[in-house]
Image (spheres, rainbow, N blue to C red):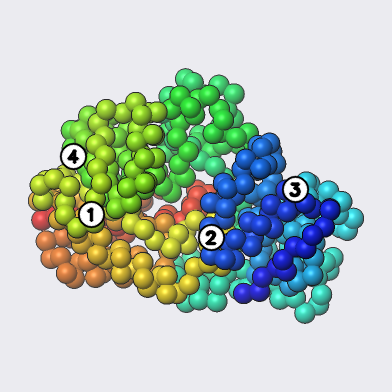
Amino acid sequence: MSKPRALGPTKRVVGTPELIAHRVVDAVFAGHPADRELARYANDLGDPKARRFVAQAVFAVFRWWGWTAPLFGADFRRGLVISHLLDSGDRVDVASDWSGPLPPPRTAGIAARAAWLRAAVAPRKLDASIERLVPPWFFESIHRTSAPNFERTLVEILQRRPPLWVRLVDDRKIAGLRLEPHATVRGAARVTSDDSVYEHPAFREGAFEVQDLASQAVSLACAPRGRERWWDACAGGGGKTLHLSSLLRGKGTVVATDVKARKLDEVRRRVRRANLQNVEIREWDGKRVPGKPASFDGVLVDAPCTGVGTWRRNPDGRWRTTPSDVRELATIQRDVLARAADGVKPGGRLVYAVCTITRAETDDVVDAFLAEHRDFAPATALHPLTGEPTDGRIWVWPWIADSDAMFIATFSRA
């Protein structure tokens, strides 16, 4: 994978968003996630609009890197401008001084953008095929459906900026926030304005949580009831913990754990802001059940994964993830799922979820688990977004409801 040439000392870009964008791009090629690097420079940018622009420009670079990489060889700014135009379809911000023809609007497909790139910008030798927009191993490694034009449909949506989804907790306090409620998922809404939701007073008061629709689908698939006791084994930032608590309507208990203690600090902060009383937070050693074995009505294993399903939001991930990452994480997933299963009581439910679509991390993990745990069986369930019956393996594809991609497997213990 070619990298942009290091930016030399030039008065034109020193201290500008363009310079920070270059630094973030360099850091990603050194192996660091773009979102973390962008957070590092948030104070340098100050203005929320500048921060949003730099994030959009950086993500545009990686979303279109398969096509635009040759353009960065001599001029970072030119590559940044063209990437931004491909992403936005308009002459804005960093591309405001662009004098050439504008690309088709964002609603246009990949073919229209490829034609614009070849005609208006790039040398004839540029390869603007859909295969170039994802890593070489991608199509051979993912779970496939029988849908017509599956590959093109998937890549088309990976090239679109993702919407921001929220989960409403108290819609009486969200005045001024422009939202489009989901047609069937209660409390789920898409943000239709460009305002920063994190600075909205309603967010600070816990009136809503930022949570992608695919992530909300996981908790809905768990379907906690009454006074049940649930264990969120890999709680991470706590989004699904809070959702499970909400679905229990303040009753029952959710025990949130993670092997990384620092992540639990974020869970504690969010639980306090939401004023939840039925959440217990504990560290987990990754081995023993936090409490008595076989004592939980339900266990959720939102396992660490490659995050392929989030490539719309984190397009840099497609160039940082390798086949060895897939194999390594699949091994971890099998181990975590097996250990967490010990917490499920007889007749209880086990839910496995990963925001990825590789076969090794989805079907293969489930097949291996069922072969080794004869006391568990697939639990048929309705798809939480479409209502269609499933065999216990639920695929949330981004074209279903304009979200991340997610795999969910539901089991019951005999």
Q: Nearer the viewer, residue 145 or 178?
A: 178
The residue carrying mark 3 is 15
Residue drawn at x 67%, y 60% is 61
- What secondary structure is marked by label 2? loop
**Badge 2 or badge 3: first in the primary sequence:** 3
Q: Quadrant of residue 374?
A: bottom left
Could you classify mark 3 by the number of other residues whose Cα lies within 10 Å: few (under 14), some (14-19), or many (20 or more)?
few
Q: Which residue is mark 4?
A: 229
Classify mark 1: residues with Cα within 10 Å, few (<14), some (14-19) or many (20+). Answer: few
Asked if the residue under mark 2 is in contact with the one under mark 1, i.e. CB atoms within 8 Å, the reply is: no
Residue 282: % across, % down? 24, 43
Judging by the rendered image, the residue that carries numbered circle 2 is 32
Determine which of the numbered discs, if any, sits on residue 285 in the image: 1
Badge 3 marks a residue whose secondary structure is loop
Q: Nearer the viewer, residue 204 or 84?
A: 204
Query: For the residues marked 1 and 2, what is the alpha-carbon distance in whole angstroms?
Result: 26 Å
Identify the mark nearer the N-term, 3 or 4.
Answer: 3
Q: Residue furthest right?
A: 99
State if disc 1 and disc 4 touch (CB < 8 Å): no
In the image, 196: left or right of 288?
right
Find residue 314 and report its horizontal and vertical position in percent. Answer: 54, 56
- Discs 2, 3 touching: Cβ within 8 Å: no
Which one is earlier in the sequence, the residue at label 1 or at label 2?
Answer: 2
Amino acid carrying label 2: it is: His
Cα distance, mark 2 to mark 4? 37 Å
Q: Amino acid at mark 3?
A: Gly
Q: Quadrant of the C terminus?
A: bottom left
Q: Give left or right: position of 262 versus 43.
A: left
* Residue at mark 2 to residue at mark 3: CA–CA distance: 22 Å
Residue 125 in picture, x, y percent from top left: 77, 79
Which secondary structure lies at badge 1? loop
Please indicate whether residue 199 sits to the left or right of residue 281 in the image: right
